[in-house]
Amino acid sequence: MSGYSFIHSYWRFPDKNRTEYIVKSTKGGIFAVLVGNLPVKGGMLIQLFAGDKGWTMDKGGVSEADVTVVAEFQQAMKRQIHNVLLNGTKGEGVYLRYGGLGIVDLKPVDWVEISDQDNHKVKIALDHMSHLPLRTVALTPDEEMHQVDEDITIYSNYKDQDGIQTPLQVSRERNGRRLYQLFYDSCKNNADLPADFFTKEALEKRFKETGGKEK
């Protein structure tokens, strides 16, 4: 990571995300974000995903997201903690196993493991006292590279936000390499967003209003 970016990230689970990046400077580098790599060299960029579709808004307008980036987003949603806990255990051929006690970040945790018939596995470290998730470890077979990818997400600095304990610091690593670290200064749960907020039309309207610039 070669710079900092200010973001607003909006979710409508299970599979809609809109992230608005206000990039001050990356010195021409590549900023690794939630999924995939987005080239950002200052200015404003919006990345929007809705199921199997995706779009990007930048200074040049609104364009379709690359199919590989959309596919990465869909795979990431299978590992997303909200979807894992609410939907991941409902599928056919899914197994839930208690993995015993452990220590994560000097705290006692209970490990829970969720796996399916395709050898996808997610391990969750739950704080032994509060039962809040402190870490997820997703193991995904990569048939092309003949290896198993390990994605680790670390949750910390929990605060009460609209009656929900919410992690205000989130870090992610892949195969031992840090991809990003997010520090939230505010969060609102159950926000009242417009019905068309996660659509291409909403981005086109935003571009007409701002010309791709921060406002």
Image (cartoon, rainbow, N blue to C red):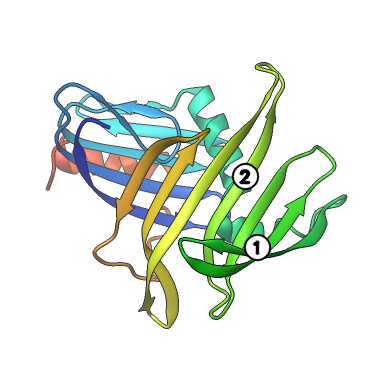
Q: CA distance from mark 2 to mark 1?
A: 13 Å
Q: Does residue 146 appear left or right of residue 159 in this picture?
A: right
Residue 36 versus residue 193: which sits nearer the camera? 36
- Res. 193 in view: yes
Q: Quadrant of residue 144?
A: top right
Q: Position of residue 115 (x, y in %)?
A: 77, 49
Q: Does residue 86 appear left or right of residue 80 in this picture?
A: right
Q: Position of residue 2 (x, y in %)?
A: 22, 30
For the point 40% across and 38% down, which residue is it?
178
Give the residue at mark 1.
85
Q: Does residue 128 appear left or right of residue 119 in this picture?
A: left
| Residue found farthest to the bottom | 163
Q: Position of residue 48 (x, y in %)?
A: 41, 41
Identify the secondary structure beneath mark 2.
strand
* Quarter that holds the N terminus: top left
**Mark 2 or mark 1, which is nearer to you?**
2
Give the residue at mark 2.
138
Q: Are marks 2 and 1 in contact (CB under 8 Å)?
A: no
**Mark 1 packing: few (<14 Cα in 10 Å), some, or many (20+)?**
few
- Which sits earlier in the primary sequence, circle 2 or circle 1? 1
Identify the secondary structure beneath mark 1.
helix
- Res. 197 in view: no
Residue 104 versus residue 10: which sits nearer the camera? 104
For the point 39% across and 47% down, which residue is it?
18
For the point 27% across and 67% down, which residue is it?
186
| Residue found farthest to the top | 144
